[in-house]
Image (spheres, rainbow, N blue to C red):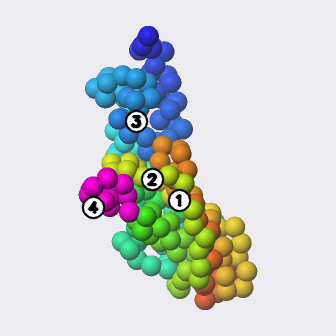
């Protein structure tokens, strides 16, 4: 039995507030309705499409990447606080997958996570020393990967960054990156004072 519109719409709004990156297709599947029904619900609720929601999140003020040019970060950085956390999104296209299976090549997931680990470092120079990686499940064409990096330790010339990547809030990749930096966070703050 399908859910009534008056019951579905508040739940739809709540679901989008929880995850502004969720697509209409995923919402349609979740609520077991057509994509067109989701679009009509969004219009009635005055909720923009996913691309507009992403732009809105990206327009929030955040720090500027120091260790590499922003265009060299794999995926789109949508939130960043240097030496604390960063978030990026990567839409998996035909260019990212094996043609036979439609499964994303692992090096794209690694590249998104690794470049985010570099981007979060508050230093002009940040290099990956080593990384411990775990692929949790395959990622398919047309899925959106949201990578979240968090700095867990800053010690002399090393910073540890944990990156977890999700598709629809399901963990698909995790990595712990040991990053070399030319200065520690405290030295950088003193130099800026």
Q: Residues within 10 Å of mark 2 (few under 14, many from 20)?
A: few
Q: Is residue 176 magenta?
A: no
Pair 4/3: label in front: 4
The Cα–Cα distance between marks 4 and 2, rounded to whole angstroms, is 16 Å
- Which residue matches tag 3? 26
Mark 2 touching mark 1, by CB under 8 A? yes
Instruction: Pick whichever, 36 or 183, lies toward us.
Output: 36
Q: Is residue 78 visible?
A: no
The answer to which of marks 4 and 3 sits earlier in the sequence is 3
Q: What secondary structure is marked by label 2?
A: loop
Camera-side mark, 3 or 2: 2
The reply to whether residue 23 is visible in this rendering is yes
Q: Mark number for residue 188?
A: none
**Residue range (magenta):** 94-105
Q: Position of residue 145 (x, y in %)?
A: 44, 53
Q: Residue at x 67, y 82 (%)?
A: 158
Left or right: where does residue 154 sit relative to residue 109? right
Q: Is residue 156 above or below residue 133?
A: below
- Would you name the residue on which mark 4 appears? 95
Which residue in the protein does label 2 denote? 138
Q: x, y percentage for residue 61?
A: 49, 59
Residue plotted at (50% across, 80% down): 67
User: CA–CA distance between discs 1 and 4?
Assistant: 20 Å
**2 over 187 or under it: above or below:** above
Q: Earlier in the sequence, mark 4 or mark 2?
A: 4
Circle 4 crowding by C-alpha within 10 Å: few under 14, some 14–19, many from 20: few
The answer to whether 67 is drawn above or below residue 139 in the figure is below
Q: Main secondary structure of the magenta part?
A: loop
Q: Which of label 4 and label 2 is nearer to you? A: 2
> Whole-Å distance between the Cαs marked 4 and 3?
22 Å
């Amino acid at each position: 039995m399908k859910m009534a519109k008056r019951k579905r719409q508040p739940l739809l709004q709540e679901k989008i507030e929880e995850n502004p990156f969720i697509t209409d297709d995923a919402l349609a599947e979740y609520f077991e309705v057509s994509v067109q029904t989701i679009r009509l619900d969004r219009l009635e609720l005055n909720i923009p499409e996913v691309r507009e929601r992403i732009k809105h999140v990206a327009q929030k003020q955040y720090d500027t990447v120091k260790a590499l040019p922003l265009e060299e970060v794999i995926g789109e950085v949508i939130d960043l606080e240097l030496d604390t956390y960063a978030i990026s999104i990567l839409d998996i296209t035909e260019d990212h997958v094996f043609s036979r299976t439609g499964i994303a090549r692992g090096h794209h997931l690694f590249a998104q996570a690794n470049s985010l680990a570099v981007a979060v470092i508050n230093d002009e120079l940040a290099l990956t020393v080593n990384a411990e990686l775990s692929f949790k499940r395959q990622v398919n064409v047309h899925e959106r990967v949201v990578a979240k990096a968090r700095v867990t330790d800053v010690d002399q010339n090393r910073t540890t960054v944990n990156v977890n990547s999700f598709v629809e809030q399901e963990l698909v990749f995790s990595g712990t990156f040991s990053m070399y930096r030319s200065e520690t966070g405290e030295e950088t703050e003193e130099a800026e004072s």
